[in-house]
């Protein structure tokens, strides 16, 4: 889900339209911990890797590795996942290295 608390802010609306579109694609393609592989999305949309820098600079995503794996910063603010349906990210170790809390550590 997308939240107005993120998408109707100055930091989001001042982004180039390409970066805004990429953010929506990333949010739609995250796992349950807010992690997304951006390579496929760049190919799908025809956007350049530089577009990711706009999202990083706006603190909307965090780069987890050099293979274009990113964490959507405000994912847990925008999404609720029932604990019974939660699937731990295959990139859980990267989240841990970056001190990013996984879903299971957020309070209800």
Image: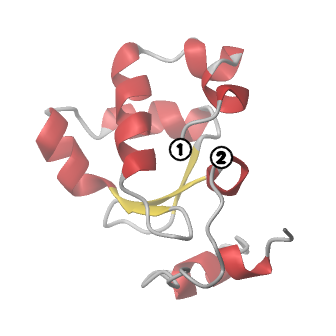
Which of the two residues, 104 or 22, is positioned nearer the viewer here?
Answer: 104
Where does the image place residue 100, in percent across and percent down from the top left? 70, 70
Q: Of helix, strand and loop, which one carries label 2?
A: helix
Where does the image place residue 14, in percent across and percent down from the top left? 57, 12
Where does the image place residue 81, in percent across and percent down from the top left? 61, 67
Q: Of helix, strand and loop, which one carries label 1?
A: loop
Q: Residue at x 66, y 26 (%)?
A: 4
Residue farthest along the right direction in this orientation:
107
Residue linked to disc 1: 1
Residue 13 appears in which quarter of the rendering? top right
Dots 2 and 1: beta carbons under 8 Å? yes
Horizontally, residue 89 falls left or right of residue 66, namely: right
Q: Residue at x 56, y 80 (%)?
A: 86
User: Which numbered disc covers residue 78?
Assistant: 2
Q: Marks 2/1: CA distance?
A: 6 Å
- Mark 1, Cα crowd under 10 Å, few <14 / some 14-19 / many 20+, is few
Where 11 sits versus 87, above or below?
above
Where does the image place residue 9, in percent across and percent down from the top left? 70, 19
- Mark 2, Cα crowd under 10 Å, few <14 / some 14-19 / many 20+, is some
Report whether residue 2 is seen. yes
User: Which numbered disc covers residue 99?
Assistant: none
């Amino acid at each position: 889900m997308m939240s107005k608390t993120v998408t109707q802010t100055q930091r989001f609306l001042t982004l180039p339209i390409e970066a805004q579109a990429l953010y929506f694609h990333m949010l739609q393609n995250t796992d349950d911990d807010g992690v997304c592989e951006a390579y496929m999305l760049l190919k799908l949309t025809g956007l350049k890797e530089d577009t990711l820098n706009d999202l990083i600079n706006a603190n909307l995503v965090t780069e987890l590795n050099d293979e274009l794996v990113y964490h959507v910063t405000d994912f847990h603010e925008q999404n609720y996942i029932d604990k019974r349906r939660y699937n731990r990210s295959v990139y859980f170790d990267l989240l841990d290295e970056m001190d990013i809390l996984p879903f299971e550590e957020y309070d209800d």
